[in-house]
Amino acid sequence: MGTEEAIAIIYDGLVSENSVPVKLRTYRELDFDLLNQVREALDVLTQYYKDKETVPKKLAIAMVDINSAFSFQAGYFDDKFLEELEGIGIELQEKAIELFSE
């Protein structure tokens, strides 16, 4: 997977109108396939950008406040699923920290 493709996957998976967070809020279902593609793309880009001083804006926009995209009020989903979503948000936030750290 190239960097442009990885950025497109992350942007589509986290920001677009067909993104994982939008599907969660609209259809109340988690698109595991898309989420796993985002995870893989983040791993690719973390390796690519680890020695670079800057990243593309599109990538940065997708990662801004990513944890809150997976945060829902109690009662929106059952407690077990809310915990799973919280874990996903934390995982993606940690990947963002790794991506943007020097």
Image: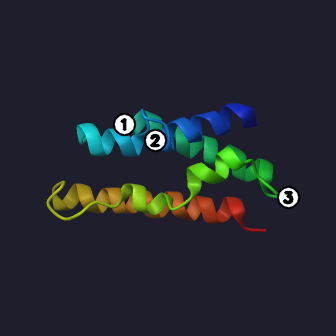
Whether tag 1 and tag 2 are in contact, CB under 8 A, the answer is yes
Residue 56 at x, y percent in the picture: 74, 47
Amino acid type, mark 3: Asp
Q: Which residue is mark 3?
A: 51
Answer with left or right where residue 91 lies relative to residue 44.
left
Q: Secondary structure at mark 1?
A: loop
- Residue linked to disc 2: 35
- Mark 1 belongs to which amino acid? Asp
Measured as percent of width and height from the top left, residue 96 is found at 61, 60
Residue denoted by label 1: 31
Q: Is residue 52 left or right of residue 4?
A: right
The type of colouring in the image is rainbow
Quadrant hosting residue 58: top right
What separation in Å lies between label 1 and label 3 (alpha carbons)? 32 Å
Within 10 angstroms of label 3, few (less than 14), some, or many (20 or more) residues? Answer: few
Q: Residue furthest bottom?
A: 102
Q: CA distance from mark 2 to mark 3?
A: 26 Å
